[in-house]
Amino acid sequence: MSHPAPPGGRRLDRRACLGGLAFGALAPRAVAQSLPIRLEPDKELMVPVEGGRIYVRVNGDLTSRRPPLIYMHGGPGGNHIGLLPLTALADDRAVILYDQLDSGRSDAPEDPANWRVPRFVDELDRIREALGVERWHVGGGSWGGTLALEYGARRPRALQSLIVQSPLVSTRSWMADAARLRRQLPAETRDTLTACDAAPPPDATVCDAATKAYYDAYVRRSTVRSPLLADYAGRQPRQAGRVVYEQMWGKSEFSASGVLADYNGEPLLKKLNGPRTLFVCGEYDEATPATVAGFARRVPGSTFREVKGSAHAILADRPAAFLELISTWCSRFDRSV
């Protein structure tokens, strides 16, 4: 396990790329503006959960015969902003987005007692009860993919289908992928990242530049910004997400030193309803296609899809392709089981 970066080390993190910054990368701009994204919710509420209240927003008709889709953001400590392109599906089915406790617009007690994987998973049940939803499609990306895996392994009666996108299934496999991907970077960048894990590290700007090179290759490849989503993000309250990210993951992408340092969800794979489970990742994803496809093979009957041209933040890199995939998948399983 890498040493956490001391003060002055890396400041960038995956939480920021998938939450607070993902809104700025819906490339190409023409595609982003053509998607019928709904910035404002049709319904919003604060739902009581263990430890506080969480912000939930809904677009579309929850009484439709098509079960709604709820999607979980990454991080830990991200927010719903990077998932707003999913609201383009709201004409066909309701889309539910929310901020986890200590993230986004939700309460931020910053209490370590709340930083438990099962407690985050339990938030789903509280949301479903508050909205009166009987059945729904559940998905999540990155850390949200971890929560999707955990929820699916519970085999809840309400689960219509499951989408496990670019997931952290185990920290061991995640760090192994990160090590392989780092070796593919230019030698100077690799050496800098190694130095940034040591004490004392180089200047923060040097470490940030090297980390950005990794993110540009494997986390988010698009650089085109959407002014509409940038404006929406600018109207959101200040977040506490950095705290929960560092305490649950670590100081940087490459130092799993927090609550999730020994996380292993691989035994849960055998508990999933395979025929109703979709594993998906990007072509250049830091959750590599080989690894995610390998997890899918351990779930009999499950489906694996790779989104070409995308890195980890698929909704930022290839929003139209991802929306088509999700829409087709959910429609396939709209009928009750």
Image (spheres, grey):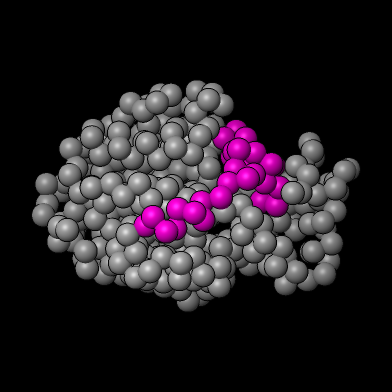
Locate residue 211: give its quadrant. bottom right
Locate residue 186: give its quadrant. bottom right
Residue 263 is left or right of residue 64, and the answer is right
* Residue 323 percent across, percent down from the top left: 33, 65
- Camera sees residue 28: no
* Residue 327 percent across, percent down from the top left: 27, 65
Image quadrant containing the C terminus: bottom left
Nearest the viewer among 87 and 119 is 119
Residue 169 is left or right of residue 207, and the answer is left
**Residue name at image x 26 percent, y 51 percent:** 159
* Residue 307 percent across, percent down from the top left: 45, 73
Nearest the viewer among 67 and 218 is 67
Is 51 rendered above or below residue 243?
Answer: above
Q: Which residues are magenta?
A: 243-272
- Camera sees residue 93: yes
Report if residue 316 lies within the magenta region.
no
Q: Among all residues in the image, which is located at the extreme bottom? A: 308
**Residue name at image x 34 percent, y 70 percent:** 301
**Residue name at image x 64 percent, y 55 percent:** 172
Residue 335 is left or right of residue 318, and the answer is left
* Residue 21 percent across, percent down from the top left: 53, 50
Locate residue 290: give its quadrant. bottom right
**Residue name at image x 79 percent, y 64 percent:** 189
